Image (spheres, rainbow, N blue to C red):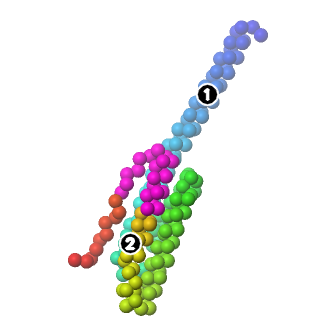
Amino acid sequence: MDATTYLAAWILAALVAIGFLSWLLARYTRRQHMRRQQAQRLLQALQRYPEWLCAQRLAAVFQGEGADAAAALDDACTIRLAWFPELAGDMAELLAVHNRILNFLAAQQALWLRDPEHWLESEHDRRFVALWRQHRFALQALLARLEQATSVRIATTPAPQRRSTYA
């Protein structure tokens, strides 16, 4: 093998290595960009849900899980499943709190229909606020893990303001 062929082989090997490294970097950058976009979608879905939950505190009649709340949680679960498997535990905790809230609201509705006096004495508002706090804690833990996983700064939003008809 003469020097020219030897040098050409090394240049070709270097170009192939540079091309491979460029492809790897582009793939990594594209994946990180997609994860950031999906993190934003997940964040939007998770921000839609508390609005429904807050409205349940003042609702006269509990009519089950609202379509908006179900769609928001469904979107969040779908995005988490496809893009953020490391958030499984935190999402499971949020869904567990959601189920406790639904069960509580359904039980309170049944009690209200069956025995309104006993319902008034059941401290329903204090128990709802306790569940609301559990929800906020689980949501904040999930958002912190999402921020850590994607290196995206997530601004903490205050709890939605309740629109009260009380004076």
Q: Which class describes the residues within 10 Å of circle 2: few (<14), some (14-19), or many (20+)?
A: few
Mark 2 and 1 residues: CB-CB less than 8 Å, in contact?
A: no
Sooner in the amino-acid sequence: mark 2 or mark 1: 1
Residue 77 shows up from this direction: no
Q: Residue at x 42, y 91 (%)?
A: 115
Query: How far across and down, in percent of the image, does residue 10 sit?
Result: 68, 17
Q: Is residue 11 above or below residue 113?
A: above
The single residue placed furthest to the right in the displayed view is: 1
Q: Which residue is mark 2?
A: 129
Q: Residue at x 53, y 38 (%)?
A: 29
In what element is the residue under mark 1? helix
- Judge whether residue 151 is colored magenta: yes
Q: Quarter-wise, where is residue 120 in the image?
A: bottom left
| Closer-to-camera residue (6/62) | 62
Amino acid under label 1? Gly
**Of the two numbered discs 2 and 1 in the rendering, the one whose residue sits closer to the viewer:** 2
Q: Which residue is mark 1?
A: 19
Q: Is residue 79 above or below residue 149?
A: below
Q: Residue at x 29, y 71 (%)?
A: 163
Q: Quadrant of the N terminus?
A: top right
Amino acid under label 2? Val
